[in-house]
Image: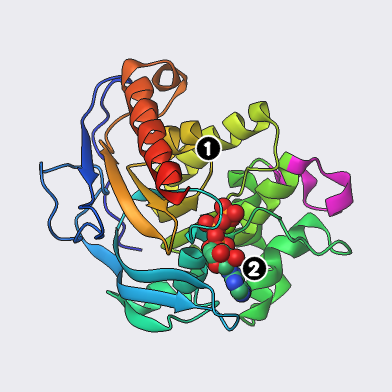
Amino acid sequence: MGRPPCPSPAKAGEGTLTTHIADEGHNLPPLLRSGGGTGRGLGNDRLLSLHGVSKTFDNGVTALAGLDLDIYEGETLSLLGPSGCGKSTVLRLIAGLTRPSVGAITWADPQVRKNLGVVFQDPTLLPWAGVFDNVYLPLRLAGQSRASAEPRVMEALSRVGLADFAQALPRQLSGGMKMRCAIARALVTEPALILMDEPFAALDEVTRFKLNDDLVALKKDLGATIVFVTHSIFESAFLSTRIVIMSKPRGRIVEEIEVDPALVRNADFRTSETFAEISRRVSRALRKATGEAA
Ligand SMILES: Nc1ncnc2c1ncn2[C@@H]1O[C@H](COP(=O)(O)OP(=O)(O)OP(=O)(O)O)[C@@H](O)[C@H]1O
Ligand SMILES: [Mg+2]
């Protein structure tokens, strides 16, 4: 799929951090990045751009106003911010589930847009269908026969550790397993871009850590770009190569924190000074964003 190569690994705890703070009252212009940070991804190719995007719903609520955001190939970008600041709206706009009221979203490669992986907080599995059939669904909708899809479905299930549960029904799975199934369904079409909206928010912390580890491994294997919405400072610090902190009203970007993509995200990283520093910065930015919302 022409994905960028993996970066050379750096030791846990070593790496670079770059913080961009938006000017008061303005979004940080996407091309005016100072400091030469490397965190926005493994490549510098823009996958898509939101240009001056505003979204006002039918009830008159303006969720976003004049949002500029570039998403780069290979990055894991987290969106953080107080409830109602517009994070899900950004994902829904990118997914094409809703359209901008003003502004535009441009795609470097329109094919990427046609094959997105989307994972929401609720795994939304078909309760009457087994794990295999739930994961097969996107391929079935694309007209692929069950027999010809089987290797891809089984590969996706193997990637998330569910190969032995292909025939199980969703009600026979734990919350974490259901989410793995939803992730397998998102991966089965081999998307270049995966959109995840608080996918692990309903899970206990141990399961969440495990799924965070698994997502890092999947990301390494697949090289897909990930846009990840979360309320968790630690999750964003662990996963991201760039963290964008948004604030109310109208989804203003208050800060961007870039993290060296070459950092190895493993158990040592979770206890490293770099991880603590990223978490501190995110926490500070979030306090600022929340304070501004008050
Ligand atoms: N379909 C809709 N119709 C009307 N208003 C909406 C709709 N979807 C979202 N909104 C409003 O837009 C704003 C942003 O909502 P959004 O769901 O994007 O926030 P969020 O940052 O994802 O919040 P949370 O962290 O609670 O999930 C909120 O004020 C919300 O009430
Ligand atoms: Mg949301």
**What's the CA distance linking mark 2 and mark 1?**
36 Å
Q: Look at label 1 and name its amino acid.
A: Ser
Q: Is residue 244 magenta?
A: no
User: Which image quarter holds the N terminus?
Assistant: bottom left
Colouring mode (rainbow / by chain / secondary structure / one colour): rainbow
Q: Which residues are magenta?
A: 162-175
Is disc 2 placed on a helix, strand or loop?
Answer: helix
How far across and how far down the image is residue 36, in percent?
10, 43
Q: Is mark 2 within 8 Å of ligand 2?
A: no
- Residue 161 falls left or right of residue 170: left
Residue under numbered circle 2? 149
Q: Earlier in the sequence, mark 2 or mark 1?
A: 2
Is disc 1 placed on a helix, strand or loop?
Answer: loop
Q: Is mark 1 within 8 Å of ligand 1?
A: no
| Rendered residue at 86%/61% (across/down) | 127
**Is 205 situated above or below 239?**
above
Q: Nearer the viewer, mark 2 or mark 1?
A: 1
| Rendered residue at 49%/64% (across/down) | 91
Q: Nearer the viewer, residue 18 or 135?
A: 18
Q: Nearer the viewer, residue 6 or 56?
A: 56
Residue under numbered circle 1? 232
**Is 212 situated above or below 148?**
above
| Rendered residue at 52%/37% (across/down) | 232
How far across and how far down the image is residue 114, in percent?
46, 78
- Residue 283 falls left or right of residue 200: left
How far across and how far down the image is residue 29, in percent?
19, 61
Q: Is residue 173 magenta?
A: yes
**Is 60 situated above or below 16?**
below
**Is 42 situated above or below 58?**
above
- Residue 15 falls left or right of residue 250: left
Q: Which mark is residue 78?
A: none
For label 1, count other residues whose C-alpha is less than 10 Å away and answer few (under 14), some (14-19) or many (20+). Answer: some
